[in-house]
Image: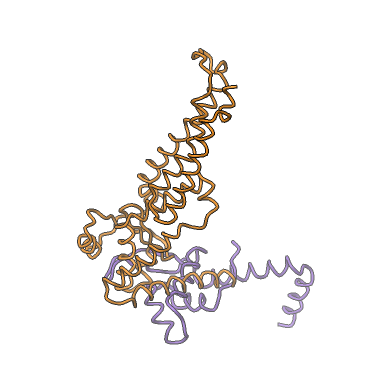
Amino acid sequence: MRFLFYLTPDMVWLIFGSWLFAIAMFFAWRKLGNPLLLYVHVTFLFLPFFAFALSLPCSMPWSTSLFQFCSIMWTKLFIYIIPVFVILTILFGYVLLPTFYTYRLDAKKYASPQMEKFAKKMGIRKVHLYWFDTMKPVAFSIRNTIFISQGIIELFVGKECEAVLLHELYHVHVHSGWKKFSTMLGRFITPLVAFSKYNPHLAYEEKQADQFACFLQGTNRYILQAKRKLEEYEQEVVHAQVQ
Amino acid sequence: MKLQPLSPLEQDILNRLWPDKHLKVREIYVLLKRTRQVALTSIAVALDRLYSRGIVNRTIKTGRGGLRYVYFPRKTKKEVEKTVLESTVNTLIDTFGSTAVAYFNERFKER
């Protein structure tokens, strides 16, 4: 009877309350964009499962053989592993992501006194700039590391490159990388995030990053030219493939 | 090695690089702009395709304005022409079979 824990009034309220709160946190995250709200949502979404694991009665002593393990213990172990997995994913995924991309892209450190000057003005303590060898114009940032491809340097003139760097510096400043990573992780863990539209805050931050570059350069000409060249490149690649 | 025919832009680019010139993307752009309407991105894409197909090679050189790709031909004009012809003829024979072979025989007889 203990196995059917959800029939007890306390457990019913726990499940109902947890999931209601989880849904509320999901909408709060959608509205405010704070990744912490997403993690609170995930915690309360899985809380009933932990309550279930804790309520399981199996108290069989540890056996010398794994095969004599109580099958319920396996269930408990599986449920307890979930938060460990999430925490490890966050720690190793987010912390080591720049290193992963550095090796994957065979990226090299790239000195840019111009970027360091802007970073200092913005109060960003340390920003790393890496360059990788591909003609495709690509720029992205993870934590406090910005990656740019040779394509950006080849195709963009000085001020356009500067606009791209300022755009990415904004993302570093507002920790967009953490928000993107959390959204991506949320898509794997929780169905509400998986089935909802892409985080609207990320789209808003893209616009803010463009406006930031325009503000510092005093004109929107260079960021618009850079975007136009990116689009032209993509169209040209498609056109060449069709040919 | 199967090689697809070259696009007119790719041919133009290769004509500028042969026999053994080392040119940057912008240098090729300046040369081609004189004779045709072309965008820098089109040249960049074409050169990248030629590089991925192994027809040209590239190195990175540091200069004024930072790092730049320098492209140079990997195959001679004759080698490329031979490979493209071989690939085209094989495709025609695979597609049309004996009709293609008969046609080639007729044409060679006429010549």
Residue at image point 74% right, 83% down: B110
Q: Is A14 displayed left or right of A220 in the figure? A: right
* Res. B58 image quadrant: bottom left
Q: Is residue A40 above or below residue A8?
A: below
Q: Is A120 displayed left or right of A22 in the figure? A: left
Q: Among all residues in the image, which is located at the extreme front? A: A9
* Res. B61 image quadrant: bottom left
Q: Among all residues in the image, which is located at the extreme bottom? A: B35
Residue at image point 40% right, 42% down: A90
Q: Quadrant of the C terminus of chain B?
A: bottom right
Pick the front one: A126 or B41: A126
Hue used for the chain lettered B: purple
* Res. A114 image quadrant: bottom left
Q: Is residue A147 above or below residue A15?
A: below
Give residue A135's position: percent from left, percent from top. 42, 65
As drawn, the chain in orange is: A
Give residue B9's position: percent from left, percent from top. 51, 78
Question: Is residue A158 among what the camera can see?
Answer: no
Residue at image point 52% right, 14% down: A60
Q: Quadrant of the N terminus of chain B?
A: bottom right
